[in-house]
Image (cartoon, helix red, strand yellow):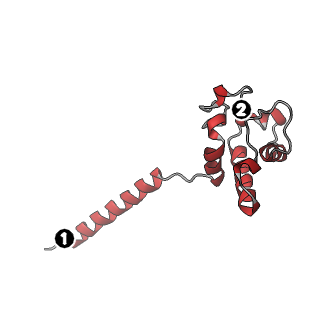
Amino acid sequence: MRQTGGLAAGFGTLALALVGGLMSCATIEPPGRRVYDEHCVMCHGAQGRGDGYFAERLLTLPPDLTRLAQDNGGTFPATRVTLAITGEGRDSHFSGAMPDLADLKLTGRAADRQLAAVVAYLETIQQ
């Protein structure tokens, strides 16, 4: 008597386990996180709390980006954040070390998409 079904079932179970394991290891990263990691993390830190590896070298410490909504009555200030990133809406408390979008040589629709993505990402990290 041959037992081919057991072998096929064994391979099927192994395949499902491998796929499940790979899916649990894969993280779906918001597109704005990539932009943040490339341009912001060195000062604002991995979690957005203003504790990046370069922050201590700045004259003005970067703000805790996880508190933007809390400091704005519970509403994420998307327009204010967008203007700060583009350099158009910075008050005197901003560090001159923060580059604006033009300094990063980002222009056109790609820049618009990256700006929208990073602002959307910042909204997701609010505490």
The secondary structure type at the circle numbered 2 is loop
Asked whether the beta carbons under mark 1 and mark 2 sit within 8 Å of each other, the answer is: no
Mark number, residue 108: none
Count of numbered tags: 2
Q: Position of residue 3 (x, y in %)?
A: 19, 70
The secondary structure type at the circle numbered 1 is loop
Give the residue drawn at x 15%, y 73%: 2
Cα distance in 3D space between marks 1 and 2: 62 Å
Q: Is residue 120 left or right of residue 5?
A: right
Q: Is residue 7 left or right of residue 90?
A: left
Which is nearer the eye, 116 or 98?
98
Check disc 1 and report the residue beneath it: 3
Mark number, residue 64: 2
Give the residue drawn at x 72%, y 50%: 120
Give the residue drawn at x 70%, y 49%: 104
Q: Is residue 4 above or below residue 19?
A: below
- How busy is the neighbourhood of tag 2: few (under 14 within 10 Å), some, or many (20 plus)? some
Query: From the image, which quarter does the C terminus lie in?
Result: top right
- What residue type is disc 1 on? Gln
Farthest-out residue, left: 1
Q: Is residue 123 above or below residue 19?
A: above
